[in-house]
Amino acid sequence: MQFKEKVVVVTGASSGIGRALAHEYASQGASVVAAARSKDKLLSLEAELKSSAGKILVVVTDVSLEEDCKNLIDTTISHFGRIDVLINNAGISMRALFEDLDLTVVRKLMDVNFWGTVYCSKYALPYLLESHGSLVGVSSVAGYKGLPGRTGYSASKYAMQGFLEVVRTENLKRGLHVLIACPGFTSSNIRNTALAADGTQQGESPRDENKMMSAEKAAERIARAIKKRKRTLVLTTEGRLIVLINKVFPATLERMIYNQLAKEPDSPFK
């Protein structure tokens, strides 16, 4: 087991890719620290993993709050004495035209997706440097190409990726591994909980979740990239095509994305 005796912290661990990552690392013998806002879902995850090869610690955490992020790292060190991997996975999305959008929605996405990554990374960094560990951000192809109807989401992912690139460069000679992982369109509940223009949850996914990569497969690929200490990971054929086409034909890609997203049920633009 590659990660036996290692300590892996996963935010947003109550569902989707985060929950799958907790299962993946527990099966590899790691001590997993699972963080999320929902205590009930964390306790459910804890019960699922108790028979696994690794150890499990759950910490109720709202990553938009700096004190919660500090408590997450302090609690991890208190229990396990080290951190080998921090996976900043917690995130929320949105779906609305910018002209219709309440600006509190953008602020909320930045607080969770960007500032949550900054807070957790800040307090974990000394321990990751000590262990020559891995700092991971679960981003999105929206951090490579702005997606219409997702202004706050794309902005937060661009900010996350820029932040992580700087941390990587600042620590080039200190043994820190930084991975920016972009799952592409992966089956998870992020679209179900995406915020509408007024900040309420949209409730229904506008895409066919059954045709997407599973959260378990995404978690397996992310864990493999961490093991190989890769710099970047873009999952799904669609995701890799978006990144590639954007380098060569950005205007063409914008039209393609517009036309595709306009076909979604209840699309905010036609």
Image: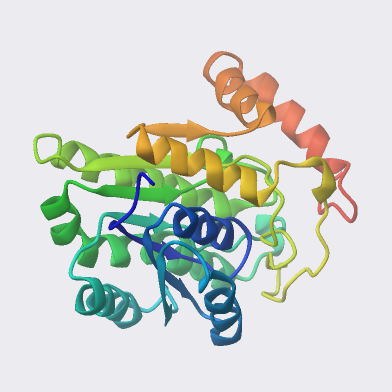
Where, by quadrant of the figure, is residue 185 drawn?
Answer: top right
Q: What residue do we see at 65% from left, 32% from top?
A: 236
Foreground: 254 or 55?
Answer: 55
- Number of callouts: 0
> Where 133 sits versus 33, above or below?
above
In the picture provided, is 152 more to the left or to the right than 224?
right
**Residue 21 seen in the figure:** yes
User: Residue at the top extreme?
Assistant: 248
Whole-percent x, y for residue 167 in the image: 22, 45
User: Residue at the bottom extreme?
Assistant: 40
Where, by quadrant of the figure, is residue 7 drawn?
Answer: bottom left
> Where 141 sits versus 63, above or below?
above
Q: How is the image coloured?
A: rainbow
Q: What residue do we see at 57% from left, 19% from top?
A: 244
In the picture provided, is 118 more to the left or to the right than 142?
left
In the picture provided, is 219 more to the left or to the right than 28?
right
Whole-percent x, y for residue 81 in the image: 18, 70
Q: What residue do we see at 83% from left, 64% from top?
A: 204
Whole-percent x, y for residue 87 in the image: 40, 55
Foreground: 249 or 177?
Answer: 177
On-image quarter of the C terminus? top right
Q: What residue do we see at 48% from left, 42% from top?
A: 222
Whole-percent x, y for residue 36 in the image: 49, 75
Foreground: 179 or 165?
Answer: 179
> Where 269 sits versus 41, above or below?
above
**Residue 269 seen in the figure:** no
Foreground: 88 or 148?
Answer: 88
